[in-house]
Image (cartoon, grey):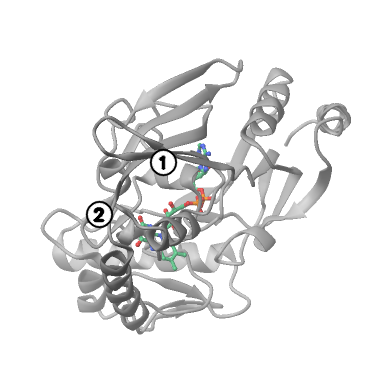
Amino acid sequence: MTAPSLLDATMAALAAIAPVRRDEPISRHTTFGIGGPADLYTKATSAEQLRRIFVLARSRGLPVFVLGSGSNILVSDRGVRGLVIENDAKAVSGPFPQPSGAARFTVESGASFAGLARRLCREGFAGLEWATGIPGTLGGAVVYNAGAYGGQLADVLVTASIVDAHGTQAELTAVDLGLAYRSSAFTRGLLHDRLVLTTTIDLSPADAGGILATVAAHDAKRLAAQPRGRNAGSIFKNPPGHVAWQLIDAAGLRGARHGGAEISAKHTNFFSNTGQATAADVKALIDLAQARVREQFGIELQREVQLVGDFD
Ligand SMILES: Cc1cc2nc3c(=O)[nH]c(=O)nc-3n(C[C@H](O)[C@H](O)[C@H](O)COP(=O)(O)OP(=O)(O)OC[C@H]3O[C@@H](n4cnc5c(N)ncnc54)[C@H](O)[C@@H]3O)c2cc1C
């Protein structure tokens, strides 16, 4: 538990930068629609504000969790201790023509990845056709090296500007960030207590008609394959040489339920909140899928979705 006196003092100091709320239900801010209260909750509307809020809270010893679109997390029913910063920093600048012919854009980390991708495709910049259906922010995309249909952020990311708890900034390249299949130096714990403030990406000017035809084909595939409703996309990564949904399906779990949570009958690597699911319900299905796939196929499913808060 975070000391109430620390929360009160930090809340008062943060109020000079942005409005702060107590006990905000995180269920309002995740695509699952699940998650207990955050001790303190605020929203940053620029990268500079994000940096200032983060450094102030950390200088007082308060834990900080930065929330993008909440599209790849399962937040505990007990919520999140310390401060949650919703990242709504979404300024975009560019295109800046490069000697290579590339069009360079600088994007704040709270920008919607799908929204940015769709807009730049329409404007005739190729390179993000695969990203137009991926929910989440640019910051979240860096953390997971978001990807689909053969594309991944690493293909277009030039640098990300990272800040640590003392406010020190560094420009890291895609190589420095260790971007790999749905993982990065962040997911491996190597950039603990650091945030992505901005990203720089390189795209290629091209014919918008051709780009949009590719986008339409991806949209149609996604619509046909994925369930709608409240979920967090793929729960598990595909194990090397296997496809997670096929393993879960073969383990007999299509449509399995626990409380208000369900393994989607349409896509068995998507778990849905059918209305009143708790985090514990979803976690029970995660444990069940891992246990069944382990028993039947000897394969350990690794979560793609991150558990946030206390699940014990
Ligand atoms: C319907 C659906 C379809 C999806 N399809 C795909 C897909 O095709 N491909 C794919 O890769 N993913 C997919 N996802 C998963 C998800 O959209 C991505 O993982 C996305 O990149 C997560 O971004 P976010 O902003 O929502 O992160 P959040 O869920 O808000 O946060 C996830 C983690 O990233 C950290 N984080 C967020 N922003 C920052 C930052 N600025 N600095 C440091 N850490 C940060 C958070 O603290 C947290 O640890 C899908 C999800 C849904 C709901």
Residue 40 in the image, given as x and y percentages of width and height: 77, 42
Q: Nearer the viewer, residue 108 or 280?
A: 108
Q: Identify whether 225 is placed above or below 186.
A: below
State whether residue 30 is above or below residue 59: below
Residue drawn at (37%, 46%), measured in percent from left and top?
144
Q: Any atom of ligand 1 within 8 Å of the CB at mark 2?
A: no
C-alpha separation, residue under disc 2 versus residue under disc 1: 16 Å
**Where's residue 122, x and y in %?**
41, 63
Total marks placed: 2
Instruction: Give the x, y percent position of residue 266.
Output: 34, 83
Please tell me how crowded label 2 is: few (under 14), some (14-19), or many (20+) other residues with Cα within 10 Å: some
Of badges 2 and 1, nearer the viewer stands 2
Query: Which residue ends up furthest to the left in the rendered image?
Result: 241
The residue at which mark 1 appears reads as 143
Determine the image quadrant of residue 157.
Answer: top left
Q: Nearer the viewer, residue 264 or 157?
A: 157
First-in-chain label (2 vs 1) = 1
Residue 2 in sight from this viewpoint: yes
Mark 1 Cα-neighbour bin, 10 Å: few <14, some 14–19, many ≥20: many
Residue drawn at x 33%, y 63% as measured from the top left: 208
Three-letter code, disc 2: Gly
- Residue at the spot of label 2: 151
Q: Residue at x 32, y 80 (%)?
A: 220
Q: Tell me the residue at 36%/67% (across/down).
A: 288
